[in-house]
Image (spheres, rainbow, N blue to C red):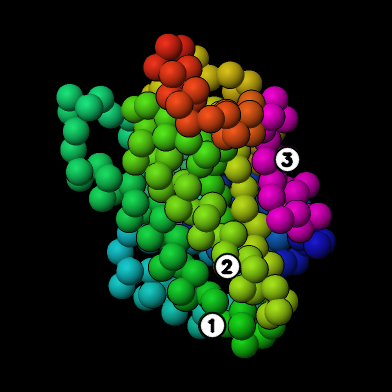
Amino acid sequence: MDLANKVIMIVGASSGIGKSLAQKLVEKKSKLILLARSFDKLEKIKDENPNAEIDIYRCDVSDKTTVKLVFEEVKRKHNFIDMVILNSAVSHRMKVENFNSELAEETISINFLGMIYCIEQILPIYLKEKKGIIVGVSSLADNRGYSGSGFYCASKSAVTTYLEGLSVELKNHNVKVITIKPGFVKTPMTDKNEFEMPFLMDSDKASEVIIKGLEKEKRFIQFPFPTVIGSKIIGIIPNRLYEYLSYKFNIVG
Ligand SMILES: NC(=O)c1ccc[n+]([C@@H]2O[C@H](COP(=O)([O-])OP(=O)(O)OC[C@H]3O[C@@H](n4cnc5c(N)ncnc54)[C@H](OP(=O)(O)O)[C@@H]3O)[C@@H](O)[C@H]2O)c1
């Protein structure tokens, strides 16, 4: 797909990968609709790109009513949104000693349900028009329960699994689903990690890889290559071996 002049929504565009993607899409001459809770950060992106077509909206994706209202406003303004990139997420590391179900509620309601609320708004239009691309940002950490990140991994497993089924269901409707699975990318989300992150990429490079994948309309956009291979191996080793190695070598994700 040529991204020039396409109307592209990024949900979770205020920092990290989403912000970097917005910048790259400005360079591609896409028309952008940017959503996040931090409206000031979206305003800054808009101010820094005075010649680009950028609409910004404050939106907390975990609030279904807000999502509905924001999409209604967007739909009034734009005839069609060619691509919706669902990127919002939070990640909390937690020790079992500090177990707190509120972190699970927050993680699942933003990372998974937030995505579902957005899909609920866009899907009827895509089904009616028989076109459109839904892009969901998952993670290479969707394949196992990494210690300390269980809620996050569970949320990303849910995202990947849900999008897999959706992709099949939408085949006959000419609506595409793209799943993005990054390895470690340097963003505010990972800046707080206290462990060493192998093959850490900067968000600029990550968004370049993502843009190339979006242009090719790849079903999966996964990177960087060594982490993809590593996660595939970790994903297929027997469960008991994984748990032993994970305990022995403190594998985290
Ligand atoms: N960085 C990595 O290593 C890595 C690896 C694998 C996957 N990912 C995935 O990549 C995506 C982007 O992450 P990132 O690393 O760029 O993190 P980030 O810099 O923390 O960005 C997260 C984005 O999500 C938005 N967001 C969070 N809660 C939201 C809410 N309730 N409603 C609306 N927007 C919300 C944030 O905006 P506001 O706070 O302003 O709302 C922000 O724009 C996420 O899905 C993450 O899981 C990242």
Return the residue at label 1: 124
Return the residue at label 2: 166
**Label 3, label 1: how many angstroms apart (C-alpha)?**
30 Å
What residue is at 81 percent from the left and 55 percent from the top? 216
Quarter occupied by the N terminus: bottom right
**Label 1, label 2: how many angstroms apart (C-alpha)?**
13 Å
**Label 3, label 2: how many angstroms apart (C-alpha)?**
24 Å
As shown in the figure, which amino acid type bears the numbered disc 3?
A: Val
Q: Earlier in the sequence, mark 3 or mark 2?
A: 2
Q: Earlier in the sequence, mark 3 or mark 1?
A: 1
The location of residue 132, given as percent across then percent down, is 67, 73
Q: Which residues are magenta?
A: 209-229
Near mark 1 (Cα within 10 A), the count class, few <14, some 14-19 or many ≥20, is: few
Q: Classify residue 140 by image quadrant.
A: top right
As shown in the figure, which amino acid type bears the numbered disc 2?
A: Leu
The location of residue 219, given as percent across then percent down, is 71, 56
Return the residue at label 3: 209
Q: Classify residue 250 by image quadrant.
A: top left
Q: Residues at badges 3 and 1 in contact (C-beta under 8 Å)?
A: no
